[in-house]
Amino acid sequence: MLTPLGWGTVAVSAPLYAAGWWLGYPEPATLAVAGLVAVAAAAVWTLPQPRLDVRREIAPVRVERGEPAVGVLHVTNRGRSARGLSAHDAAGPEPVSVEVPRLRSGGTRSVTYRLPTGRRGEIPVGPLRLARADPLRLARRVREYGTSTVLLVRPRTVRLPPLPSGRAHHLEGPTSDRSPAGTATFHALREYVVGDELRHVHWKSSARTGTLMVRQLVDASLPTTTVVLEARSGAWPEPDDFELAVDAAASVAVGAAAANFPVRLLTGEGRLADTRGGPDDVDVLLDRLTRVTTRDGPWSAVDAVRRVRAGGSLVVVTSGAAELGRVASIRSRFDRVVVLRVRPAEPASAPPGVQLIDVADLDGLAQAWRRLGNVR
């Protein structure tokens, strides 16, 4: 397959040869013949199909926005010595080119290259194309290897402690030992570990699996942290502001989940996640927020709150002051209400019973949030 340079050489050489022959000048004709011979030699150079084993890895497959992620390309040559190889990968709309060193027969090369992680979302990586070109880049042969792999670029987060809320404050998280009488409920079965109480053993499951299984209990009295993200397109004229809003929502949700508190995650369109509390929930929350995008719709963030169970903390992430009045109307349904305004255009006063934080960046959010935890 000829490259644009190869086709250009052919397009110039043919009329150059005709002009030299017609005018009786041998120099242009000789130059044209040299060009055509070079194109023919390039086509012959790339004609043999190299016998290659190609494998690509991505590390890590989940990464925070802006953090490094790399592709590792492993190429093994099963045929004759091969040179002039280059790999062409794709990370979403962005092409990534990688030069592969010369491969001797039976040799293996591993090449590492950076993947772009500046944009949050599910980034398809691949398919990988391996091209072999002649030294003059007049012709090349391209072959695809493998399929696409998804790189999850998650929101950035800062560590935020959970806000005290509700009538029962279990700051150590939900365990059956610390839960008040009548509030411990069944959550899941897990294998027995030393120290578990024998009264929690589930004998039927233990007999069926051949492994001692115990019932994992959670404290149903723990307050839920409800995080509501405004995701209507009209609220975010600047895409970077919406990315910061997603980062802020992720930081609040992850902070509560890491402390073993239940978390409910909403947008105006409805529920994104509803977790029971625990470190495993962090991945669930981050993955759901990785996929969230702005959309046109009539439902605001506060509209979604009206459709969920009351109680616990409510954190609304929005852009301006338009929602403050509506948030105040549902204040009585929650023990604590916080509004995070991301890069607002104008100052605003918090309604009675509502705490307000203006967020310019994640570091500022972390400082204001810690001060907020000392105010009740």
Image (spheres, rainbow, N blue to C red):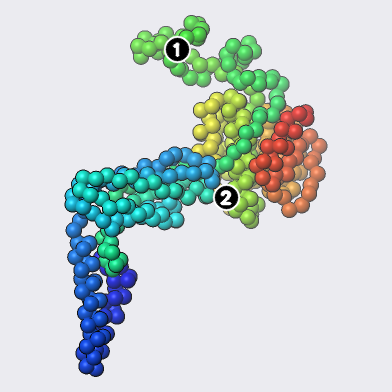
Identify the residue at image location x=58%, y=16%: 175
Q: Is residue 329 visible?
A: no
- Give how far across and how far down residue 143 sits, in percent: 27, 55
Mark pair 1, 2: CA separation: 45 Å
- Give how far across and how far down residue 20 sits, in percent: 24, 89
At label 1, which amino acid type do we have? Tyr
**Label at residue 373:** none
Residue sitting nearer the eye, 333 or 312: 312
Dot 2: element: loop
Residue sitting nearer the eye, 140 or 257: 140
Name the quadrant containing residue 82. bottom left
In the picture, measured across the screen, residue 60 lies left or right of residue 22, that is: right
Residue sitting nearer the eye, 57 or 318: 57
Q: Which residue is mark 1?
A: 192
Q: Is residue 286 visible?
A: yes
Identify the residue at image location x=63%, y=55%: 238
**Nearer the N terminus, badge 1 or badge 2?**
1
The answer to whether mark 1 and mark 2 are in CB contact below 8 A is: no
- Give how far across and how far down residue 95 sits, in percent: 42, 56
Identify the residue at image location x=81%, y=44%: 349
At label 2, which amino acid type do we have? Thr
Q: Which residue is mark 2?
A: 294
